[in-house]
Image (cartoon, rainbow, N blue to C red):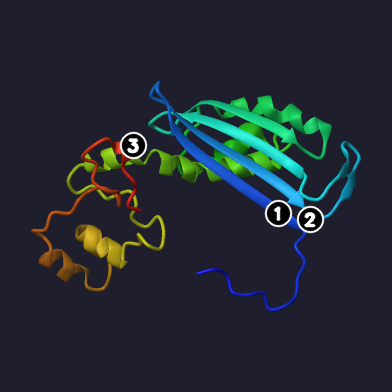
Amino acid sequence: MPLSPPPVERTKLHNRTYDFQGYQRSDGLWDIEGRIVDTKTYAFDNDYRGEIRPGEALHDMSIRLTIDEDFVVHDIEAVTDDSPFAVCTAVAPNFKRVIGCQIKAGWRQQVRKQIGAADGCTHLIEMLGAMATVAFQTLYPVRARRANARKPGEKPGLIDTCYAFRSDGDIVRKSWPAFYTGPDAPAVRSSESGQRVDANDGFVDMKEDPVKQEPGA
């Protein structure tokens, strides 16, 4: 369902687009690529570039993040094709400091610590933070395989990561009754104790090539 109609007349001034892709490489690593483009609906003067016309990119920046199956960064490339200042391109080498970091809880803090505000770019750092969830979606086959190998009694990693997978919600009650914490938890665990629960963290069963399968969540 789309957003409701705006209650008053309005004029569009700014547009920002994000574009992300995830790739499995032939060498066993994975590439996560992102691009951010900012445009305005009006012309304005810029000291570095002169007039920037409507629809012309004020910011056009890209990142390629190369990671392994443990989400450790092996390489990173940052590129600025358009920016409001000539000096913006100089920060690209600083992003190499992220090599060796691991995408996990606190990823955004890691990035800021390694690069720092004065040595980075607000837009590239913001995009790098958003690329973490793209990485998790791209490496879904790896996550599913590891989830299926989880030890008996080990809590699924998806529980309590969002509203849908909250421990007292219906999805957890049906998929992982042993970890359900809702008001009828004892009854659920008792009635479903003999039921086999797929330990796949919400992913589809991978019986063939996992990369060709689609995530179930």
Q: 10 Å neighbourhood of mark 2: few (<14), some, or many (≥20)?
A: some
How far apart marks 2 and 1 lie (CA) works out to 8 Å
Q: Position of residue 31 (x, y in %)?
A: 48, 31
Quarter holding residue 86: top right
- Placement of 45 over or under 63, stated as above or below: below
Residue 134 relative to residue 189: left or right: right
Tell me the number on the disc at residue 211. Answer: 3
Residue at image mark 1: 15
Disc 2 residue type (three-letter): Thr
Residue at image mark 2: 41
Residue 90 relative to residue 135: left or right: right
Lower position in the chain sequence, tag 2 or tag 1 = 1
Q: Position of residue 80 (x, y in %)?
A: 71, 33
Residue 92 relative to residue 201: left or right: right
Disc 1 residue type (three-letter): Asn
Q: 10 Å neighbourhood of mark 3: few (<14), some, or many (≥20)?
A: some
